[in-house]
Image (cartoon, rainbow, N blue to C red):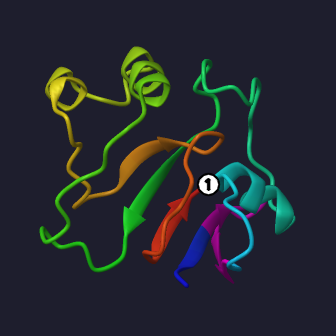
Amino acid sequence: MGSITFLARRRCGGWVEQIQVRRSGRGRRTLLELIERHGLRHRCDCRAGTCGSCAVRVAVVGSQGGFPGVRLGPLERETLYAGGKLTRQQYAAPLVASGVPMWRLACQYHPGEEDIIVAL
């Protein structure tokens, strides 16, 4: 099973806290469900993938150019593009390169088996 490292920024001191969790094999949860399950707070207005308020930066650990890319669902692709999180080139491509941190909608993204880092 892959792990998720959340980088949570605290309001008071501006420092970053790293919280690492391991996913269980039971059920496929969205990233937003995992965030809430571990007691973290993250803005989410609609939970349907249309507003983009839950967008987070996600990096796949160890994907230095060897990871071919991510296939975004139509709703996530449209919402991220409308919110300025995807370039026109990324929007048009069938796969979005994932070698660098990329934007994902926490309410739509179902993490796989890879280890990821999520900036909240």
The image quadrant where one finds the C terminus is bottom right
Give x and y (percent) for residue 46. 75, 23
- What residue appears at the point 74 percent right and 38 percent down from the top-left corner? 43
Observer able to see residue 11: no
Would you identify the image quadrant in which residue 11 lies? bottom right
Query: Position of 90 compared to 72: left or right?
Result: left
Task: Name the kind of residue labelled 1 in the image.
Answer: Leu
Does residue 99 appear left or right of residue 59 in this picture?
left
Residue 84 in the magenta stretch? The answer is: no
Q: Which residue is mark 1?
A: 120
Q: Quadrant of the N terminus?
A: bottom right
Image height check: is 99 above or below 71?
below
Find numbered disc 1 in the image and state the secondary structure of the residue it sits on: loop
Q: Assess whether residue 8 is covered by the magenta stretch.
A: yes
Residue in the foreground of this view, choosing between 27 and 89: 27
| Residue 39 placement (x, y as % from top left) | 87, 64
Q: Which residues are magenta?
A: 7-23
Tell me the crowding category of disc 1: few under 14, some 14 to 19, or many 20 or more residues within 10 angstroms, Cα based: many
Residue toward you, 79 or 85: 79
Q: Residue at x 74, y 34 (%)?
A: 44
Q: Residue at x 84, y 63 (%)?
A: 37
